[in-house]
Image (cartoon, helix red, strand yellow):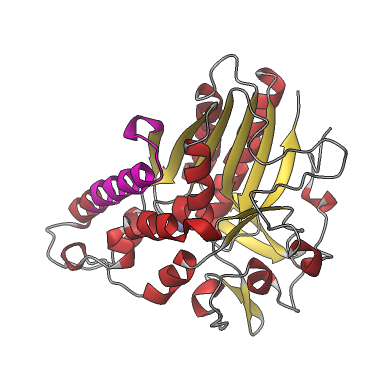
Amino acid sequence: MKCLPTSYGEARYALLAPLLLGIVAGFTVSSCGDSESYNGIASASHSMLIVVSPHPDDESIMAAGTMYRYAHEPGWSVEVVFLSSGDAAGIPGPCREPTEQEKKRKIIELREEEARRACSILGIEATHVHFLRYPDKQLVATSTFSGGRRHDSFTPEGTSAVEELTRFLPRLVPEGTRHVTIITTSLWDAHPDHRTAYWGARQAAQVVATEQRIRVQLLSAIVHDEFPRGPEWCCLGDIVWPNEGPFLDYFTLSDIPERPRPPIWDVLFNVGDLRTIRSASLSAHTSQVEGNAELCMILLWKPYYQRWMEKIEEAFYEEYFVP
Ligand SMILES: [Zn+2]
């Protein structure tokens, strides 16, 4: 079976938000399109979850509850790969640091430590947490918006990032592995680094399936949505997302009439019972949630993190790659 393997022109589009409400009970997974389906995580023998996070904090935003569950599930191992360590998180300027370079170095050190702490809260030891240290926000040179999504041309660093993920992820998968699930950010994400992570993870999924002959499920999530701003499309729409409801709802997030929706989110994990864990792992990214004056990391978006802490379900777009 192969679902949506070759082209995003083939992507299916959302048609049944009300139906999705019926899927969220328990840790239930709907599969894509044929008779083969997973019953959550129970069917695994030796299986792996690899989380490809563009920056420290995206892993917890998109999948903290899911990571926690897989990390505690017998027969599963979990690896987390950070594409960038978020070195552009401070505002430019002298601040209290001698040089921009020194400031970046300290931000990387701090954010990696926070990432390790967040992963540890989720049950993932530091030896399973990897940092590729690509430069923050420098992976895409230009992009155009058409057909409801961005079409990117990568910078040399972006090209290297995709290539390194394609090589690195298969190396994490030991012989004898029966199944790999990769979670990453979406092709429909507004942040260029997030789309770069997607393309790298996707290419790696193809390699694992074709060369290692292991079945791969690729799950991707939107962290930052696109919003129309006059004639332009603007990034990070979720920060100004107007809905003040108690729960983060991906369908509302993506439901903008002017824009074709991303394809149906066909995998939903109910993490309503893991809000304390989600909250703790997100809070471990202290420089993001609280700011850090020493490194000119100014807190702009506390409500943004608060909303992610309140999330009760994790929603993913699903693709399969088979040997
Ligand atoms: Zn990010």
Percent coordinates x, y for residue 236 in the rendering: 52, 70
Q: Residue at x 55, y 26 (%)?
A: 75
Percent coordinates x, y for residue 305 in the rendering: 42, 68
The answer to whether residue 66 of the structure is visible from this angle is yes
Per the image, is 108 magenta?
yes
Q: Residue at x 56, y 63 (%)?
A: 312
Percent coordinates x, y for residue 230 in the rendering: 64, 85
Instruction: Report the magenta stretch's main SS.
Output: helix
Where, quadrant-wise, is the N terminus in this rendering?
A: top right
Q: Residue at x 64, y 34 (%)?
A: 42
Looking at the rendering, the stretch of residues picked out in magenta corresponds to 107-128
Compare residues 68 and 205 and report the one nearer the observer.
68
Where, quadrant-wise, is the C terminus in this rendering?
A: top right
Image position of 93 (left or right of 138): left
Q: Toward which corner of the image does residue 237 lie, by quadrant?
A: bottom right
Q: Report the number of numbered marks.
A: 0
Compare residues 98 and 149 and report the one nearer the observer.
149
Vertical order, 210 against 84 (above or below): above
Compare residues 105 and 61 and report the one nearer the observer.
61
The answer to whether residue 140 of the structure is visible from this angle is no
Q: Toward which corner of the image does residue 254 lie, by quadrant?
A: bottom right
Percent coordinates x, y for residue 268 in the rendering: 67, 54
Per the image, is 24 magenta?
no
* Residue that lies at the very extreme toward the right in this rendered image: 34
Vertical order, 55 against 213 (above or below): below
